Amino acid sequence: SRPPAAARRWLPPRGAVLPPWPPGGEGGPGPRSSASPPRGAAAMPTIYPSPPKPLLLFVTNVKNARTIWVEISINDNIHMLKRYVNRKMEIPIGDMILIYLGEELKNDTRIKDSKLSRMVDNAPSLSEDCTIHLIDIKDTPTDLREPPPPPAVP
């Protein structure tokens, strides 16, 4: 049996923007504030644009060819991408080098500001276009590694 109509709760559709509550202003019933619309006039709801769709990326370790997938927002930076990869591959973030189209992806670069943004514009199929190559520094020969930066002298 269904509850009576007065007892059923009405929920707005997902993503709907509702006018402020209570209708009399923020202080509850009482005199209306000058910022509220006049009685009888409907308040215009604020409609926000939907967030960007997540980007599906494939990250392949060049040593063992293990491939994982990552969903990430185009507004995130490369460091966030490395954190997601770290969760799945258990490679320390400091030991990762991510390569896309022959270019290293720097930590402070946002995805939409890097070469990865062309994936958003072109909407590639699931192919090499959306594959990022991962190099683990520990897997490279020591004579090919970049020398560590010199210690700072106070």
Image (spheres, rainbow, N blue to C red):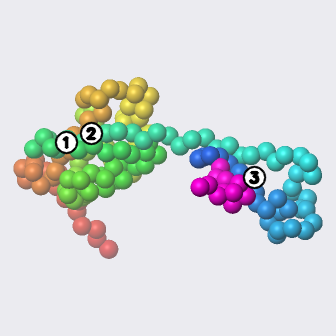
Residue 72 versus residue 18: which sits nearer the camera? 18
Q: Residue at x 50, y 40 (%)?
A: 52
Is residue 10 located in the magenta-colored stretch of the structure? yes
The x and y percentages for residue 114 are 39, 39
SS at circle 2: strand
Foreground label between 3 and 1: 3
Q: Quadrant of residue 138?
A: bottom left
Q: Contact, CB < 8 Å: mark 1 with mark 2? A: yes
Q: Earlier in the sequence, mark 1 or mark 2?
A: 2
Dot 3 alpha-carbon crowd within 10 angstroms: few under 14, some 14 to 19, many 20 or more: few
Q: Contact, CB < 8 Å: mark 3 with mark 2? A: no
* Amino acid type for the residue under numbered disc 3: Pro
Q: Rounded to the nearest whole Å, what is the CA distance between mark 3 and mark 2?
A: 42 Å
Left or right, 122 with reference to 11: left
Q: Residue at x 59, y 55 (%)?
A: 1
**Mark identifier at residue 19:** 3
The x and y percentages for residue 119 are 38, 31
